[in-house]
Image (spheres, rainbow, N blue to C red):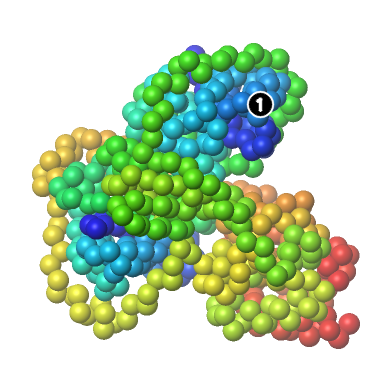
């Protein structure tokens, strides 16, 4: 089974405190720590486990700048066989539909039975997988937390409200967006990264993919981010300050009053 | 005139709360827009919901077909492409169905797409200005959406004020005949119900709920001790279940349990909307987090900037000494 996994390099929400820049229109990106989108690790792990069972290969792909190569290498260190970097100045500012169109162009050059992505990434939209599926006329399932493959049939479980699971049978090829918790992604050490450090990762741009620059990037985007801001959320929490002992004393009084103790 | 269509999700003949929230969202998009509810399904449940919607919407489009008895996003999408005008504004909830349906629908409608809207600031020409969040709610953004060829959007449940039912006396329009070809490459099989755990977190008046800040499986015990001191039980956010440190039945959130405690102790929980979506009944929320910018401090009643691994043992000791 030939599997393509779409991944993304994102600011790490666990490692950063996000601040606006001095102009107030973008994040202060100078000291941001980036990593591979958390959901994508689960997708790559799932792809590797499927190939271990039924054979085939795993290709990881991303749309991004030169620095995105590092996330491809990380996923290759996990066990993905190939990496493809789709990179072009013309791709900058793409909305979800633009990213899906770029991925579609490369997908059609391969012969993939299964395409996976993380259920969502840094922007929290969860959009590219469903768009790519519709563009390719492949069936799609989002928030997948179980996959079973036998005799060319694929059965997938979707995580729905209340911790329930919706089981579906799908035709191949198909596109799945993968929810966290479907597996336990393997650890990648420095040695693993070193092993794949010199593996060639092809870089493809607009002309390689036969795309019209007017249809991707900022030029083709129908949905554009105007600015970042920190919303005025009113008062927010009453912050307890002082020494830990003082804080605990105040907290215990409040917990008593509210029925917590 | 701007035309807005809102998809009504329902279960067992009862519409989800978002059905009452779309009218407020629609008003913020364009005060003068027409708003039409769209309900798909089969049989008596569908009829009941369609009738109920006439008290909220002036027009309710109903599509009844046996293949729509369970909302399979691929089948619903096929129907909607036939029913919704291509230049319209289409709204659905940012829930597990909406996320399944909406991105692909925007492709088939050749429309713009925007996900998880939390606010709208109106239309200027053919540009709709809206607000959404990124990075797990850490920052908000304004987005400008070109709606000249229509737009498909998901709206975050709970973000728009619910209207009172009974404000409209609308009519149901049966468009079942326009459903078209409903063959699909994805077939719904069954729902596997969530596993019941050893502890029912929905029954506890007080919850000590842990998130990523717990850092390690061994530290769960620290939360357990605080929970015992407070005569309560330990619940958690999603990453703790993903890491298999606690069982799924302990997870609070839209994809886990919905809880209604009196006091909710959010320990090292950032406070994503998916997590807070499972905290109902307006409990007294205490948030302890070492990141002063954690979104949880926007919704908590009391906030404390400390490392939970230092704070929880001291709190436990102080309570035990009472």
Residue at the far left: name it.
Answer: A207
Which residue is at 26% across, 80% downward?
A: A192
Is label 1 in a helix, a strand or a loop? helix
- Chain letter of mark 1 equals B
Q: Residue at x 23, y 57 (%)?
A: A2
The location of residue B167, given as percent across then percent down, is 73, 20
**Left or right of B239: which side holds A82?**
left
**Residue placed at 53% from the left, 47% from the top?**
B190
Residue lying at 59% horizontally and 84% vertically, measured from the top left: B218
Q: Which image quadrant for residue A98?
A: top left
- Given residues B30 and A188, the one toward you in this image is A188
User: In the image, is residue B181 above or below residue A233?
Assistant: above
Figure check: B6 above or below A43: above
Q: Quadrant of residue B203?
A: bottom right
Residue A48, percent from left and from top: 30, 67
Residue A88 seen: no
Residue B186 visible to an observer of this rendering: yes
Q: Which residue is mark 1?
A: B44
């Amino acid at each position: 089974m030939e599997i393509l996994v779409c991944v993304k390099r994102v600011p790490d929400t666990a490692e950063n405190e996000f601040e606006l820049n001095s102009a107030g229109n973008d994040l202060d990106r100078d000291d941001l720590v980036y990593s591979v989108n958390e959901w994508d690790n689960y997708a790559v792990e799932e792809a590797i486990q499927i190939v271990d069972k039924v054979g085939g290969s795993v290709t990881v792909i991303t749309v991004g700048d030169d620095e995105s190569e590092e996330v491809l290498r990380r996923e290759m260190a996990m066990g993905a066989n190939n990496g493809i970097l789709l990179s072009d100045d013309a791709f900058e500012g793409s909305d979800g539909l633009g990213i899906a169109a770029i991925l579609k162009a490369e997908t059609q050059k391969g012969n993939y039975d299964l395409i996976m992505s993380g259920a969502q990434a840094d922007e929290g939209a969860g959009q590219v997988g469903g768009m790519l599926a519709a563009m390719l006329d492949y069936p799609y399932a989002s928030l997948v937390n179980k996959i079973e493959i036998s005799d060319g049939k694929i059965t997938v479980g979707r995580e729905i409200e209340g911790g329930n699971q919706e089981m579906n049978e799908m035709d191949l090829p198909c596109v799945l967006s993968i929810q966290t918790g479907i597996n336990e992604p393997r650890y990648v050490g420095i040695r693993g990264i070193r092993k794949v450090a010199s593996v060639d990762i092809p870089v493809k741009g607009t002309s390689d993919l036969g795309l019209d620059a007017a249809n991707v990037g900022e030029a083709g985007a129908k949905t554009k981010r105007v600015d970042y801001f920190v919303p005025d959320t009113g008062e927010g929490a009453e912050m307890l300050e002082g020494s830990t002992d003082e804080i605990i004393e105040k907290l215990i009084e409040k917990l008593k009053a509210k029925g917590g103790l | 005139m701007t035309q807005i269509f809102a998809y009504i999700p329902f279960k067992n003949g009862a519409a989800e709360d978002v059905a009452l929230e779309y009218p407020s969202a629609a008003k913020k998009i364009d005060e003068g827009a027409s708003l039409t509810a769209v309900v798909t399904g089969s049989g008596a449940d569908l009829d009941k919901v369609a009738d109920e919607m006439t008290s909220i919407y002036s027009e309710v489009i109903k599509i009844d077909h046996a293949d729509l008895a369970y909302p399979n996003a691929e089948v619903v999408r096929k129907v909607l492409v036939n029913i919704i005008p291509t230049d319209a504004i289409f709204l659905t909830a940012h829930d597990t169905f909406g996320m399944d349906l909406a991105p692909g629908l925007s492709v088939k409608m050749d429309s713009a797409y925007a996900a998880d809207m939390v606010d709208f600031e109106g239309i200027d020409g053919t540009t709709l200005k809206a607000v959404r969040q990124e990075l797990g709610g850490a920052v908000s953004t304004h987005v400008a959406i070109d709606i000249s060829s229509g737009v498909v959007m998901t709206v975050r449940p709970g973000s728009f004020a619910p209207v009172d039912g009974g404000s409209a006396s609308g009519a149901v329009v049966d468009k079942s005949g326009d459903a078209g070809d409903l063959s699909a490459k994805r077939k719904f099989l069954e729902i596997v119900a969530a596993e019941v755990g050893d502890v029912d977190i929905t029954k506890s008046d007080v919850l000590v709920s842990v998130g990523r800040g717990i850092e390690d499986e061994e530290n769960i015990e620290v939360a357990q001790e605080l929970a015992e001191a407070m005569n309560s039980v330990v619940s958690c956010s999603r990453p703790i279940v993903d890491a298999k440190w606690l069982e799924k039945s302990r997870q609070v959130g839209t994809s886990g349990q919905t809880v209604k405690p009196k006091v909710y102790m959010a320990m090292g929980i950032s406070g994503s909307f998916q997590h807070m979506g499972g905290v109902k009944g307006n409990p007294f929320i205490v948030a302890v987090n070492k990141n002063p910018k954690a979104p949880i401090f926007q919704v908590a009643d009391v906030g404390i900037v400390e490392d939970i691994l230092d704070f929880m043992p001291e709190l436990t000791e102080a309570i035990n000494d009472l």
